[in-house]
């Protein structure tokens, strides 16, 4: 019996070894075949390369894009919470809203600036992360429209505070908050105009667009951070100037400031994380290269 068991075990062991060797040989043969197809101009090379691109995209999606919706939802929850808290702060603790030159008109300013230069600004940045498979031109139009809405709402907020100051004989542009806010608004407006001229209605060459694109993205995030920093300055000014002090309003304002910081950090994370970038579209890139070649001749590069 012992001899029979040993003999059957040896046969099973040899069978397992043979299967392992066969699998190793098959894998080695497939790898050599794939490498030869990739390096040679055989008719099957495009098929193999397309398979590699598909596998790369699948790996890209499994790596980080699965968590993207959760981050986006988190950013929207934070942004809406900031707007609601600003509305409650100015509407409940501040007495409400009006357009009659009174203190109630000033309350329009914080609400519009948080809604425009923070929330809508951040959402305009995120459209390139949310709409990953739509056409690039459609996403550009949406990006420009959201930022145009942010500009319009911000203008309403600026007119409200300047009109309030003028009707009550208050000086304009005295504080650091007002200087930083005006600088941020002007630069944001210039950034929007440059984005339209470079990318949506491109008059610049492909080389100039390629050069300006990283600057546009960088300064967009810088201005968003500056908007939040300016909002924090304004929150501090309102708290210190409120008489008599209101602990409930002060606590709400401080929580609002923390949520604004969390919002800009999350938007910056989504905008800069490599796994969340819009995947390349070979068809759009080919059309872009063809269009640039026809219009520029010697410069076929695309942004």
Image: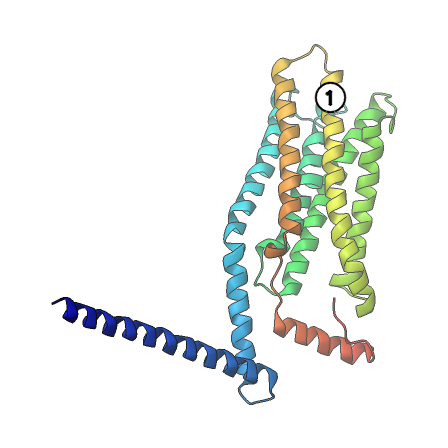
Q: Of residues 50 and 238, which is closer to you in this image?
A: 50
Report the residue that reaches farthest toward the front: 3
Residue farthest along the top direction in this orientation: 244
Left or right: where 63 falls relative to 196: left
Q: Quadrant of residue 256?
A: top right
Quarter the N terminus occupies = bottom left
- The single residue placed furthest to the left in the displayed view is 1
At x 33%, y 77%, the residue is 18
Where residue 213 sits: x, y (%)?
Answer: 76, 59
Position above or below: 46 against 109: below
Badge 1: how crowded within 10 Å, few (<14), some, or many (20+)?
A: some
Where residue 5 sits, quadrant-wise, is bottom left
Q: Which residue is mark 1?
A: 238
The residue closer to the viewer here, 255 or 135, is 255
- Report the residue at 79% width, 51% height from top: 191
Any part of residue 220 in sight:
yes
């Amino acid at each position: 019996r012992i001899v029979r068991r040993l003999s059957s075990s040896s046969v099973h062991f040899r069978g397992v070894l043979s299967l392992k060797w066969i699998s190793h040989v098959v894998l080695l043969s497939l790898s050599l075949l794939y490498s030869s197809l990739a390096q040679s101009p055989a008719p099957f090379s495009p098929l193999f390369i397309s398979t590699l691109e598909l596998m790369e995209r699948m790996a890209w999606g499994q790596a980080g894009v699965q968590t993207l919706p959760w981050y986006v939802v988190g950013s929207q929850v934070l942004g809406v919470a900031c707007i609601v808290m600003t509305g409650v702060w100015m509407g409940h603790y501040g007495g409400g809203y009006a357009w009659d030159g009174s203190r109630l008109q000033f309350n329009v300013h914080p609400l519009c600036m948080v809604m425009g230069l923070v929330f809508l600004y951040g959402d305009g940045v995120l459209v390139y992360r949310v709409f990953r498979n739509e056409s690039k031109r459609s996403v550009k139009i949406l990006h420009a429209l959201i930022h145009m809405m942010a500009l319009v709402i911000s203008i309403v907020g600026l007119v409200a505070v300047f009109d309030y100051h003028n009707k009550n004989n208050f000086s304009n542009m005295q504080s650091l908050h007002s200087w930083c806010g005006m600088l941020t608004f002007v630069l944001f407006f210039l950034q929007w105009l440059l984005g339209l001229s470079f990318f949506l209605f491109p008059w610049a060459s492909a080389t100039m667009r390629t050069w300006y694109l990283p600057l546009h993205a960088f300064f967009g995030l810088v201005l968003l951070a500056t908007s939040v920093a300016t909002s924090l300055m304004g929150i501090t000014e309102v708290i210190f100037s409120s008489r008599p002090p209101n602990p409930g309003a002060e606590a709400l304002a401080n929580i609002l400031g923390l949520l604004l910081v969390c919002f800009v950090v999350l938007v910056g994370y989504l905008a800069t994380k490599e796994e969340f970038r819009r995947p390349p579209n070979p068809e759009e890139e080919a059309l872009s290269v063809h269009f640039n070649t026809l219009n520029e001749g010697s410069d076929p590069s695309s942004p």
